[in-house]
Amino acid sequence: MNLKRWQIMVTIICLITGTFLHFTYELSNYNQIVGLFSAVNESVWEHLKLLVFPMAIVSVIGVFAIKKYSKNYWLSQVLGIITAMLFVVIFFYTYTGIIGKNIAILDIGSFVVGIILVEFVTYKILKSKKEYKAEVPSVLLLIVIILSFIIFTIYPPIIPLFEDPIYGTFGLEPKRID
């Protein structure tokens, strides 16, 4: 498969899958297993799952489809995921810090830009002729990232990154209805 075509296809798949993951927890009748990889509330952390899990899944699939194009395959995937996560967090806290509130269209836009950015970074690293010999550490880092999302969904730190701004709850904690 052509690498550029693969990256375009992956971008579209991640956009669709990530959007769907925003709703799967509620659609599953709040199944906690589904909540481990779906957004369980409106916190920034939970919305990062919408980027991370689709990209992690296509990364595993990509091993069979495009790994042959690069000796830096896993490095490209992990750096792309980290780039997208950083972009979304920095963008969110910057614009909400400036205007004092969040705006849904900007949040959705940052998700879209994050996905496009990850695929751009991934593509550039995949096309690089230099070998970085970081495949094992990259896979281990991806596992740590995925485990972090699972653990922090169950046991979220009580800090703003993990707080649902609508209900003031954290992780799988039931929504407070006053």
Image: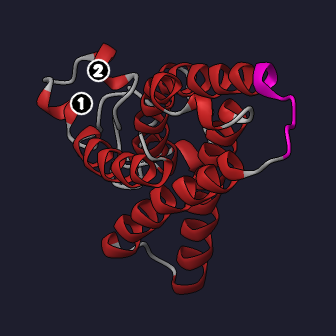
Residue 148 drawn at (x, y percent): 61, 25
- Under circle 1, the secondary element is helix
Whether pointer 1 and pointer 2 mark residues with C-beta atoms closer than 8 Å, the reply is: yes
The reply, left or right, for residue 153 in relation to residue 141 is left
Residue count near mark 1 (Cα–Cα under 10 Å), binned few <14, some 14–19, many ≥20 = many
**Viewer-closest of 175 and 69:** 69
The reply, left or right, for residue 136 in relation to residue 57 is right
Residue 172 drawn at (x, y percent): 38, 26
**In which quadrant of the rendered view does residue 101 lie?**
bottom left
Q: Which mark is residue 25?
A: 1
Residue that sits furthest to the top in the current view: 33
Q: Which mark is residue 34?
A: 2
Residue 154 drawn at (x, y percent): 48, 19
Dot 1 or dot 2: first in sequence order is 1
Q: Which residue type does callout 1 highlight?
A: Tyr
Q: Residue at x 48, y 30 (%)?
A: 62
Residue 134: say if magenta.
yes
Which secondary structure class fits the magenta region best?
loop
Q: Quadrant of the N terminus?
A: top left
Residue 152 drawn at (x, y percent): 56, 26
Q: Which mark is residue 69?
A: none
**Viewer-closest of 84 and 65:** 65
Q: Residue at x 68, y 36 (%)?
A: 70
Cα gap from disc 1 to disc 2, whole angstroms? 6 Å
- Under circle 2, the secondary element is helix
Residue 16: say if magenta.
no
Q: Which residues are magenta?
A: 130-137
**Viewer-closest of 154 and 74:** 74
Q: Which residue type does callout 2 highlight?
A: Val
Q: Residue at x 51, y 21 (%)?
A: 150
